[in-house]
Amino acid sequence: MAYITLNRTKLRENYNYLNDLFKKNDIQWAVVTKLLCGNKSFLQEVMDLGVQQVCDSRVTNLKIIKQMAPNMETIYIKPPAKRSVKSIVQYADISFNTELSTIRLLSEEAGRQEKVHKVIIMIELGELREGVMRDDLLEFYSQVFELPHIEVVGLGANLSCLYGVLPNDDKLIQLSLYKQLIEARFNRKIPLVSGGSSVTIPLLLQSQLPSGINHFRVGDTLFLASDVYNNSTFPFINSDVIRLYAEIIELTEKPKAPSGELGHNVEGHTYDFSNVDSDATSCRGLIDIGILDVEVEHLKPVDPKMKIVGASSDMVVIDVEENPRNYKVGQLVEFELDYMSALRLLNSRYIDKKVID
């Protein structure tokens, strides 16, 4: 069985670097755990770091976290579904919200559970995903402040996840100014301005982050060293905390081009091999993962001479040319992962998960 590893030593090194960075800048931060898909062994490694606050977008994952660490502060980081309100109040200490009708339901449910549920109101800053429109924000807050069993602890924004809208001085200063405006209008303290995520870290490193931004939500950079802003990786922390290992299950010299009449494959794609020498051959292998587990466009073999040349539901085809490294059937192949490949693989029950030192 193919498996993913999480290196606890490298994870701790990344965590310590980020934690020192945020402490130095007087910023509170939460680890975004949705990448781990509720895997208990990987979540335990995160908790062992001394994390105080975690974010997730699946209430089932927050339930697991609360069962493992009842005192962990949990944040549900997308607008709640109305049918999930009971579970969200039960397992999320804080939730991100954009709909007044949903917050009213959270208020009612928090009363039934004899709790005060905390909310962060998300504002639309141009990414066009979740967020209250700016013109409606003051009226929105005025109504939320009247609700019992609800404590407004912040405002926030999401950038880069949908269309790649980047954070900059203008957008983040807007967020800070709205916080000041709300506090002045309603004489209420708004503790958190949650405008930071992995994509915002370069601004912090370059001392370009507006002073009002005091809360970050980080997962991508912690686990994969991702520099989301520049679509690269940070060279000063570990990019190989998480790796994939898959077994070679066939290895044979074969033609580079298929023979026979070509139609559509199982994904509906067609291929043109008219520029490939019909007599050319190479050493082609099969490994024991497939599209069911991951989108192969997001996999990168550690061996630079290895190429992924195709995939079906449960097998990936690799080409190692003349096989200079003398690969054999049964040997494991190592892959670098990006966020999307790690997410898909960790969500696959066909991929084993292992913690290593």
Image (tube, rainbow, N blue to C red):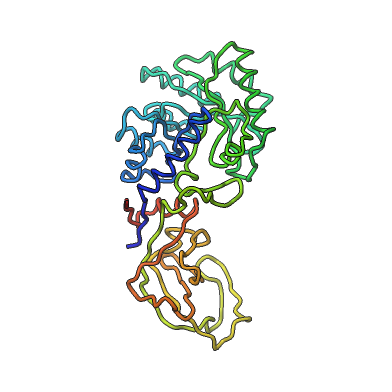
The furthest residue to the bottom: 279
Question: So how many labels did they put on this image?
Answer: 0
Taking depth in this image into account, of 160 and 81 the one nearest to the observer is 160
Would residue 175 be found to the left or right of residue 72 on screen?
A: right
Taking depth in this image into account, of 299 and 17 the one nearest to the observer is 17
Would residue 208 be found to the left or right of residue 152 on screen?
A: right
Residue shown at the point (64%, 23%) measured from the top left = 178
* Figure check: 159 above or below 234: above
Determine if residue 139 is in view.
Answer: no
Query: Residue 127's quadrant in the figure?
Result: top right
Q: Position of residue 161 (x, y in %)?
A: 57, 43
Residue shown at the point (49%, 34%) measured from the top left = 77
Determine if residue 293 is in view.
Answer: yes
Image quarter in which the N terminus is found: bottom left
Q: Position of residue 187 (x, y in %)?
A: 59, 11
* Figure check: 261 above or below 109: below
Query: Residue 41's quadrant in the figure?
Result: top left
Taking depth in this image into account, of 205 and 221 the one nearest to the observer is 205
Q: Position of residue 149 (x, y in %)?
A: 44, 16
* Figure check: 149 above or below 308: above
The furthest residue to the top: 187
Q: Position of residue 219 (x, y in %)?
A: 47, 42
